[in-house]
């Protein structure tokens, strides 16, 4: 082999290459280990489970829809509700067991102040399940 000359373009440059052979070896070993161990994991102990008598579950409570129209009026399931009657209705709803969810719908033209008022009233009444209804 001839000694390097000054005319060679690669003189003094570093060549960094990733050696893929060890990585491939490790991946093949892991693949073989997983193939061997998967059938061992799927075998389980046979257990005789007890049978429970079928009990009727309580029906889920129907959601209550509280809407705020464009003029700022409140509607409880499509029935108009005065401001003074809103809080007692929310408190009665919060006392129900299980508590039905409250779906809050705000008209796009409604003032945010009225929607925030409904949200604050629901929080003060103790409503735990509140859903904001929007259009997709």
Image (tube, rainbow, N blue to C red):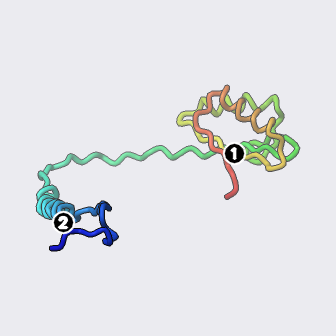
Q: Does dot 1 land on a helix, a strand or a loop?
A: strand
Q: Is residue 69 above or below residue 35?
A: above
Quick one: 109 or 55, which is closer to the camera? 109
Label 2 crowd (10 A; few <14 / some 14-19 / many >=20): few
N-terminal of the pair, mark 2 or mark 1, is 2
Quick one: 133 or 85, which is closer to the camera? 133
Q: Disc 1 designates what residue? A: 65
Apparent side of residue 58 relative to residue 87 in the rendered image (left or right): left
At which x and y percent is residue 81? 81, 38
How many numbered marks, from 0 up? 2
At which x and y percent is residue 87? 74, 29
Q: Disc 2 designates what residue? A: 21
Q: Residue at x 85, y 41 (%)?
A: 72
At which x and y percent is residue 56? 41, 47
Label 1 crowd (10 A; few <14 / some 14-19 / many >=20): some
Q: Residue at x 14, y 49 (%)?
A: 47
Q: Quadrant of the N terminus?
A: bottom left
């Amino acid at each position: 082999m001839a000694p390097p000359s000054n005319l060679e373009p690669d003189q003094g440059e570093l060549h960094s290459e990733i050696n893929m052979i060890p990585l491939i070896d490790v991946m093949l070993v892991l693949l073989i280990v997983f193939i061997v161990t998967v059938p061992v994991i799927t075998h389980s102990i046979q257990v005789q489970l007890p049978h429970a008598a079928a009990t009727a579950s309580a029906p889920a409570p129907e959601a209550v829809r509280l809407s705020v129209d464009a003029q700022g009026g409140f509607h409880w399931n499509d029935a108009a509700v005065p401001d003074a009657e809103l809080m007692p209705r929310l408190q009665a709803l919060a006392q129900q067991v299980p508590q039905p969810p409250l779906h809050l719908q705000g008209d796009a033209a409604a003032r945010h102040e009225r929607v925030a008022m409904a949200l604050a009233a629901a929080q003060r009444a103790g409503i735990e399940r509140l859903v904001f209804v929007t259009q997709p």
